[in-house]
Image (tube, grey):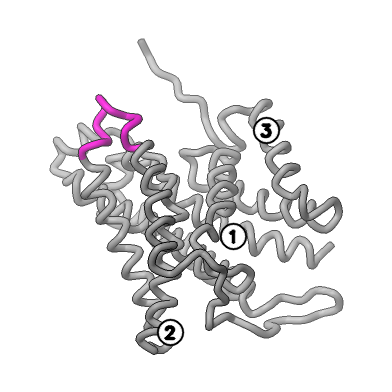
Amino acid sequence: MGQVLETGIAMGSLYSLMALGMVLIFRTTNVVNFAQGAMAMMSTYIAFAFLTSLHWPVWAALIAAMASSLALGALVERVFIDHSSRPSAPIASLIITLGLYSVLEGVATIIWGANPTAFPWTLNGIFWHRGHLVVSTNDAATFAVTLILVVGLFALLRWTRIGLAMRAMAQDASTAQLMGISLAKISSSTWALGSALGAVSALFLLPITYLQPTMMDTALLLAFSAAVLGGFSNLPGTLLGGLIVGVLESLVGVYVSNQLQNTVVFALIIVVLYLRPQGLLGRHDIKKV
């Protein structure tokens, strides 16, 4: 049981990172980014290209991948989302992200092909072993990076000027603009940060999956479900939702069936949301009319 929980928490941490990126973007710009997984996938291929074609060292290739994810997030927001996220066209940005999801996967297929490819670098080995419980190096790194990023994200939002601006924009964009906050800069920064969180999730998934254009499809769906389960506008709830989904997925895979993992997980999520539509830590929005 301990090993199952450890594996589930590791996977849940990655789902939480991707979900936090989606929720951060949604809270600030009111856009659900369904291209999050495809954007993260592109960063892994960029790391792959730097490693295999340019023969860069691993650390440099990973830095290049993260830089590209930041740039891609900001670029997508500036080019495609900025003019489509106005109140008069709330659905346009959603359709754009769905379209980008297909376009980015198509571009990756054209450039690198659709065949699954083993990533040339992984965190192999055992980090800690006691009794029947084994913590791999990749899982240990996942725990450490997730903890650092989550603490850093909450510190950013609470104690920095850009974090305060993000919170102000999420609360009331019009008032924030009147107070001198540049909505364009904050929106681009939020998309860049959300894209980077997704890229980290994708890079740590590489040791347990193959590199291919569709590698993040299931992870995106589970991350989105985790965000909804926790309460889509609630960051702590999103983190909790990701861990719950990861543990449930691991338990079902071991004790029920690998083929029924997603089926059982989504069935339980449906039950929870039926009983509590706002999510585990979400709140009902009360508006005066």
Q: Is residue 233 left or right of residue 169?
A: right
Q: Position of residue 60 (x, y in %)?
A: 37, 83
Quadrant of the image occupied by residue 226:
top right
Badge 3 or badge 2: first in the primary sequence: 2
User: Which residue occupies 27% across, 43% down?
Assistant: 81
- The secondary structure that most of the magenta stretch takes on is loop
Mark carried by residue 52: 2
> Which residue in the structure is indicated by mark 1?
13
Q: Amino acid at mark 3?
A: Ile
Q: Amino acid at mark 2?
A: Thr
Residue in front for this viewpoint, 104 or 246: 104
Q: Position of residue 195 (x, y in %)?
A: 38, 57
| Mark 1 and mark 2: Cα distance apart in space | 28 Å
266 over 132 or under it: above or below: above
Q: Position of residue 212 (x, y in %)?
A: 52, 65
Q: Is residue 18 visible?
A: yes
Badge 1 or badge 3: first in the primary sequence: 1
User: Which residue occupies 32% across, 29% down?
Assistant: 90
User: Which residue occupies 30% across, 60% down?
Assistant: 72
User: Which residue occupies 49% across, 68% down?
Assistant: 148
| Mark 3 and mark 2: Cα distance apart in space | 43 Å
> Which residue in the structure is indicated by mark 3?
270
Dot in front, 3 or 2: 2
